[in-house]
């Protein structure tokens, strides 16, 4: 697991769950239903991760997370 300078994991547990489902080709709606959260919350988690990684899209975020070792696919 990679981490930032403070030794904290890059992703929260929930962000990791969202992205693990995202790489399984789940839609925002399916992820929301599976995690019992709203679709807006799913989108917020995805946006937060994209901001942390300084990338412009979901697929770029997935590629970067895999590269960093934060997401195993």
Image (tube, grey):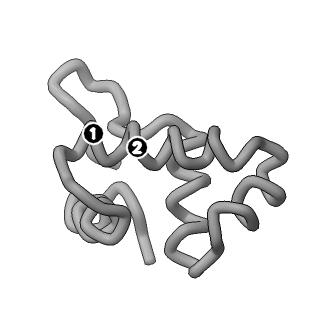
Q: Residue at image x 83%, y 57%?
A: 33
Measured along the vertical axis of the image, is residue 19 above or below residue 22?
above
Q: Residue at image x 51%, y 41%?
A: 45
Which disc, if any, is residue 2?
none
Res. 58 image quadrant: bottom left
Q: Nearer the viewer, residue 17 or 60?
A: 60
Q: Residues within 10 Å of mark 1 (few under 14, many from 20)?
A: few
Q: Residues within 10 Å of mark 2 (few under 14, many from 20)?
A: some
Residue 8: where, in percent of width, then height?
34, 26
Q: Residue at image x 39%, y 37%?
A: 48
Residue 69: where, in percent of width, then height?
29, 61
Res. 65 image quadrant: bottom left
Res. 62 image quadrant: bottom left
**Left or right of residue 55: residue 13:** right
Q: Residue at image x 81%, y 59%?
A: 34
Residue designated by label 1: 51
Mark 2, secondary structure of its residue: helix
Q: Looking at this view, name the residue that lies furthest to the front.
A: 40
The quadrant of the image that shows the C terminus is: bottom left
Residue designated by label 2: 47
Residue 26: where, in percent of width, then height?
64, 74
**Left or right of residue 59: residue 25:** right
Mark 1, secondary structure of its residue: helix
Q: Nearer the viewer, residue 56 or 52?
A: 56
Q: Looking at this view, name the residue that lies furthest to the top.
A: 6
Q: Are marks 2 and 1 in contact (CB under 8 Å)?
A: yes
Residue 59: where, in percent of width, then height?
33, 71
**Left or right of residue 44: residue 35:** right
């Amino acid at each position: 697991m990679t981490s930032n300078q403070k030794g904290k994991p890059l992703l929260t547990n929930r962000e990791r769950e969202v992205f693990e489902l995202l790489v399984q080709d789940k839609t925002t709606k399916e992820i929301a239903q599976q995690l019992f959260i709203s679709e807006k919350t799913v989108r917020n988690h995805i946006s937060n991760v994209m901001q942390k990684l300084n990338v412009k899209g979901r697929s770029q975020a997935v590629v970067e997370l895999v590269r960093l070792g934060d997401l195993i696919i």
